[in-house]
Amino acid sequence: MSRPLVTIAVPTYNRAAFSLPQALRCALAQTYRDLEILVSDNCSTDDTEGVVRSFSDPRIRYVRHPENMGANNNFNYCIREARGEYFLLFHDDDLIDPDLIETCVSATRGHEPVGLVRTGTRLVDARGAILAEYPNRVGGLATTEFILGWFAGRTAMYLCSTLFNTKRLREVGGLKSKHDLFQDVGAEMRVAARFGRVDVPDVKASFRMHSNVMYPEAKIDQWCEDSLELLDVLRGLVPPDDRARVWTLGLRYFCDKMYLYASRLTSPAERLRTYWRIFGIFGYTYSPMHFLYSRNVRPLVMGVRRRVAEFALNR
């Protein structure tokens, strides 16, 4: 079987001095060599073009847009322009292991045609230090259990660890959602449910967390709307008998995630007001009191119990 061309698309904007060079080095260091690296510059005002030109590899294809088209439009531009049979959307501040593409392409053997291949993901901070690792533990599960596995933390949904079949990604409409916030997960779920997936348990990519990201109330409202839109999509992807379970568990999952965003608000009054609005948006299924207990009180209680048990054993 011939080795398929793979497109690694790097949408970028003003990251020349920070992470773009490292992202390009990651792409060029892939052990799988049949690549094109599409750099889609969203009208950067820094030296992005100079940085890209400094890498004299013929596999790099650089496009500079005359005006900023918005991040998600840039993502979908990459999907439209990709020449590869498989496609990785590689954000310019994320990282991929040298054997990510090789591992994913090898995993498709015997599974063609396949909609996508997913690996595990690690979370790193701004300096690249590892914060957490999430092996991909949903291999072999049908769509319903795959979705519930995401809710339960058995897998993490990030683009840097997902290799799409380019044709199939286009067929589901690329990346789209009401506010372009959960558009990545929506695309992964649609492709996986319609065209199948292959799961690699090993961690092969790193998503960079920016600890200083805080959302205002209006942005959290948008996240809530995108959450409900995505949950409705997920409910439509599973058999009728599973829809109620996906909806119920999904409400709690997304409600908890929105509480986490709201917990970063600096004003206590604003934080409390947002908690209760989220509570209502998600049908009063999971109260902010439970969230606060599980995040703040329960770890303290469990710590005390552990120390008491250790003391009793050592007497």
Image (cartoon, rainbow, N blue to C red):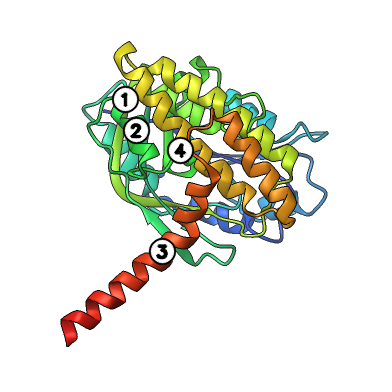
> CB atoms at circles 1 and 4 under 8 Å apart?
no
Q: Quadrant of residue 112?
A: top left
Numbered label attached to residue 107: none
SS of the residue under disc 2 = helix
SS of the residue under disc 1 = helix
Compute the Cα span from label 2 to label 1.
Answer: 6 Å
Q: Position of residue 306 (x, y in %)?
A: 29, 72
Disc 1 target residue: 144
Residue 81, relative to residue 54: is it above or below? above
The residue most toward the bottom is 315
As shown in the figure, which amino acid type bears the numbered disc 3? Answer: Pro
Q: Residue at x 23, y 79 (%)?
A: 310
Disc 2 target residue: 148
As shown in the figure, which amino acid type bears the numbered disc 1? Answer: Thr
Which mark lies nearer to you, 1 or 3? 3
Number of residues whose C-alpha sits closer than 10 Å to that of mark 4, classed few (under 14), some (14–19) or many (20 or more): some
Q: Residue at x 38, y 56 (%)?
A: 133
Between disc 3 and disc 2, whose residue precedes?
2
Q: Residue at x 26, y 28 (%)?
A: 1
Residue 97, relative to residue 225: is it above or below? below
As shown in the figure, which amino acid type bears the numbered disc 4? Answer: Tyr
Compute the Cα span from label 3 to label 4.
Answer: 19 Å
Compute the Cα span from label 1 to label 4.
Answer: 15 Å
Residue 166, relative to residue 95: is it above or below? above
Q: Nearer the viewer, residue 279 or 134?
A: 279
> CB atoms at circles 2 and 1 under 8 Å apart?
yes
Between disc 1 and disc 3, whose residue precedes?
1
Disc 3 target residue: 299
